[in-house]
Image (cartoon, rainbow, N blue to C red):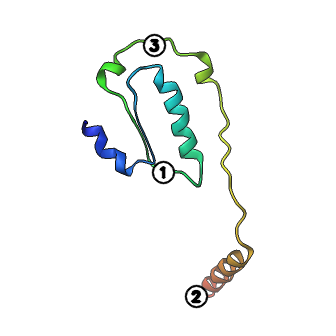
Amino acid sequence: MSVNDTLRPVSRYFDRVTRPEALVASALQAMRVLTDPAETGAVTLALPQDVQAEAYDWPEEFFADRVWRVRRPAPDPVELAEAVRAVRAADNIP
């Protein structure tokens, strides 16, 4: 247990990285959580100092440009109509 464990209850995704090579999969998983509207939330990647100090030959694919598609459902037509009415009514206030 460490101070980092205090963030576990408030993190949607928590990972303690114990080896530099584990950061590749962990970072990709963290981005998946951050870009998923249904599962989004705080992400914690705990990197102990000894892991931070280790050298690692990072694969070039890790730094490749990625497109993270965020699903955006269409608004409910009834709720949208209600919002439009509310905005239009607010414009009539002097």
Label disc, if present, on residue 56 of the rendered structure: 3
Neighbourhood count class around disc 3 (C-alpha, 10 Å): few under 14, some 14–19, many 20 upward: few
Q: Is residue 3 left or right of residue 78?
A: left
Residue drawn 30% across the image and 23% down it: 49
Q: Secondary structure at mark 3?
A: loop
In percent of width and height, residue 81 lies at 72, 79
Front one among 67 and 28: 28
The residue that appears at 59% across and 53% down in the rendered structure is: 37
Residue 88 locus on image (x, y percent): 67, 82
Question: Answer yes or no: do the residues labelled 2 and 1 have beta carbons within 8 Å?
Answer: no
What amino acid is at disc 2? Ile
Q: Residue furthest left?
A: 2
Q: Is residue 68 above or below residue 50?
A: below
**Residue 93, numbered circle:** 2
Q: Quadrant of residue 69?
A: top right
Q: Secondary structure at mark 1?
A: loop
Q: Which residue is mark 1?
A: 41
